[in-house]
Image: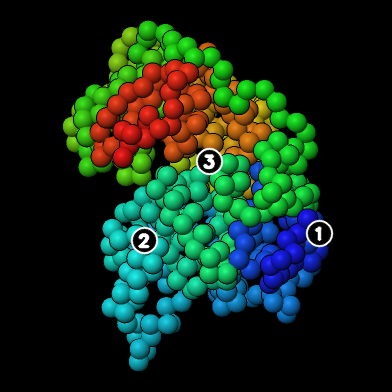
């Protein structure tokens, strides 16, 4: 049932989008009202990003019409959409590494600072500062290159950029699950402010709870078709889940035992690890153990994952991994050391660090396995391996030869995760492993992680999602200001608030 009291200002009629043989969006007709926060939910690959990209003119439509305040709306490009009052935050990083924060904010709109044929940099910097302050972020130097900042800060720069243009429709595509609680709170506050000003937010997320908490209505997509639109009064977790996947989701979401036991053998040892982001971090990861790392943005947890995989260097301390079939500990100083010693790493920044976007799904899945397979690799064994991963993770694709860049965000994440499963890596660092993954597949991933524990893998999960850490880990280390402040062992009584106390 559509909300009748508020004014409809935006409509789509029979939007249709095909990518080759794939129908991503199928006759989607929806209306948005002024002053509402509308959630868009659906399984990975159900068409959410495609619809938003059509609305914001990032992606051309195959057929169908859009109307803005009753007038036909056919934007030529994202700049044109922005001029019509529509801005979007994309799921992946939408910023350019080599540019400064200010240049990123005004990318494509530099002409607004043209003065007698040259760009007035001073004014650009002042406006960029203002844009950041508008969203309540004051600790970013807008003259610095954006690559110096964390994933979260880069996302907030995109938010500042979108809001600078005072959009009537602000589209947020699956951004919050990549943010810490602090970053999420900024987004929630902005959504509320937009609503209070009589503007509209289209909010895409896989986190049912946040959708139910913050949205006025939810539109549910399945295979490119709208299957339901539910007003707040009718929000019910089971109804939404059922509507999304078309079946009942049963069983335990996380592991059901509370036994933190693991084997005695140390697989990974971090001793007094120190660099500009982390301070004197020591931990041990045993065979068959899952250790979680919790913390707020800037606490150093993502950087800890990077040093363990040899991506970042230490100034003091060391990382050691056990040598295969022995007790000997080998120092890890580079990615090559990490791979040789069977360490895998699911990066949070999947497009830049985890995947080769133009390469096929098969090649991406097989790549890390190649250096570790000891038998002869044939095209047939590669295909068999890729098939197994695609099936077990329900990767939605037209074939294993499809390029990863064409997949939906959640399906890319499944490839990034699948790369390290089933090969010979025995120590796996997972940074935000279920980012952007729908609830059905999240469940499969948790079962796989648990199975890996039982098979003797040593797993480190770095995550902003506390229920995931509490639900899956044998112990949780809480980081703050680069240091480990507290350790909790798995227990039925452990709660989010106990952990948060040490994060802030
Ligand atoms: N550039 C592209 N080329 C080919 N297929 C594409 C392209 N972009 C999207 N698709 C396909 O369109 C379908 C819908 O993808 P879309 O990204 O809209 O899904 P989504 O609901 O946003 O998923 P997620 O929750 O994983 O982000 C998927 O099957 C996807 O593989």
Tag nearer the camera, 2 or 1: 2
Count of residue discs: 3
The N terminus lies in quadrant: bottom right
Residue at 58 percent of width and 41 percent of height = 209
| Relative side of 336 to 233, left or right | left
- Residue 322 at what x, y percent from top left? 35, 16
Q: Which mark is residue 114?
A: none
Q: Let me know if residue 353 appears in the view.
A: no
Mark 3 / mark 1, whichever is N-terminal: 1
Q: Secondary structure at mark 3?
A: loop
Q: Residue furthest left?
A: 316
Q: Nearer the viewer, residue 91 or 215?
A: 215
Q: Nearer the viewer, residue 36 or 17?
A: 36
Mark 3 / mark 2, whichever is N-terminal: 2
Q: Which mark is residue 27?
A: 1
Does the Cβ of the disc 1 residue fall within 8 Å of ligand 1? no
Does the Cβ of the disc 2 residue fall within 8 Å of ligand 1? no
Q: Which mark is residue 435?
A: 3
**Mark 2 vs mark 1, CA separation in Å:** 39 Å
How many residues crowd around disc 1 within 10 Å: few (fewer than 14), some, or many (20 or more)?
some
Residue at 75 percent of width and 42 percent of height = 243
Report if the CB atoms under discs 2 and 1 are less than 8 Å apart.
no
Q: Which mark is residue 136?
A: 2
Report if the CB atoms under discs 3 and 1 are less than 8 Å apart.
no
In the rendered view, tell whether residue 245 sits above or below residue 387.
below
Residue 450 lies in quadrant: top right
């Amino acid at each position: 049932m559509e909300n009748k009291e508020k004014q409809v200002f935006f409509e789509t009629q029979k939007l249709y989008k095909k990518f080759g043989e794939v129908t991503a969006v199928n006759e989607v007709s929806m209306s948005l009202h002024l002053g509402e926060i509308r959630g868009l939910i659906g399984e990975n690959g159900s068409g959410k990003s495609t619809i938003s990209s059509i609305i914001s003119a990032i992606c051309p439509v195959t057929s169908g019409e859009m109307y803005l305040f009753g007038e036909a709306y056919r934007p030529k490009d994202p700049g044109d959409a922005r001029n019509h009052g529509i801005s979007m935050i994309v799921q992946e990083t939408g910023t350019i590494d080599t540019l400064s924060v200010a240049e990123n904010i005004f990318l494509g709109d530099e002409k607004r600072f043209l003065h007698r044929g040259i760009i007035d940099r001073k004014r650009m910097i002042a406006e960029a500062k203002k844009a950041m302050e508008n969203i309540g972020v004051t600790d970013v130097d807008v003259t610095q290159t954006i690559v110096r900042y964390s994933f979260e800060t880069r996302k907030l720069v995109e938010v500042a950029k979108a809001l600078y243009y005072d959009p009537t429709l602000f589209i947020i595509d699956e951004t919050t699950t990549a943010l810490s609680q602090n970053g999420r709170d900024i987004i929630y506050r902005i959504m509320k402010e937009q609503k209070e000003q009589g503007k509209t937010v289209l909010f895409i997320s896989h986190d049912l709870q946040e959708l139910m908490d913050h949205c006025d209505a939810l539109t549910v997509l399945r295979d490119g078709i709208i299957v339901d639109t539910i007003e707040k009064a009718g929000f019910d977790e089971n109804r939404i889940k059922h509507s999304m996947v078309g079946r009942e989701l049963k069983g335990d979401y996380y592991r059901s035992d509370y036994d933190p036991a693991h084997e005695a053998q140390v697989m990974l040892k971090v001793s007094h690890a120190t660099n500009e982001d982390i301070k004197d971090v020591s931990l041990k990861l045993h065979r068959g153990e899952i250790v979680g790392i919790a913390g707020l943005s800037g606490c150093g947890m993502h950087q800890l994952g990077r040093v363990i995989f040899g991506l970042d260097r230490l100034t003091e301390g060391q990382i050691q991994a056990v040598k295969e079939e022995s007790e000997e500990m080998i120092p890890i100083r580079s990615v090559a050391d990490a791979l040789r010693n069977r360490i895998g790493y699911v990066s949070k920044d999947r497009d830049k660090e985890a995947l080769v976007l133009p390469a096929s799904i098969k090649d991406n899945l097989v790549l890390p396995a190649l250096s570790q397979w000891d038998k002869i690799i044939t095209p047939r064994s590669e295909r068999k391996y890729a098939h197994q991963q695609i099936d077990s993770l329900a990767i939605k694709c037209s074939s294993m030869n499809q390029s990863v860049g064409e997949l939906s965000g959640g399906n890319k994440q499944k490839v990034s995760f699948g790369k390290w499963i089933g090969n010979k890596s025995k120590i796996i660092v997972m940074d935000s492993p279920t980012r952007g993954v729908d609830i059905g597949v999240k469940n499969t991933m948790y079962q796989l992680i648990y199975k890996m524990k039982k098979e003797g893998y040593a797993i480190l999960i770095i995550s902003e999602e506390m229920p995931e850490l509490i639900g899956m880990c044998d112990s949780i280390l809480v980081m703050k200001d680069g240091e480990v402040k507290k350790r909790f062992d798995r227990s039925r009584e452990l709660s989010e608030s106990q952990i948060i106390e040490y994060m802030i």
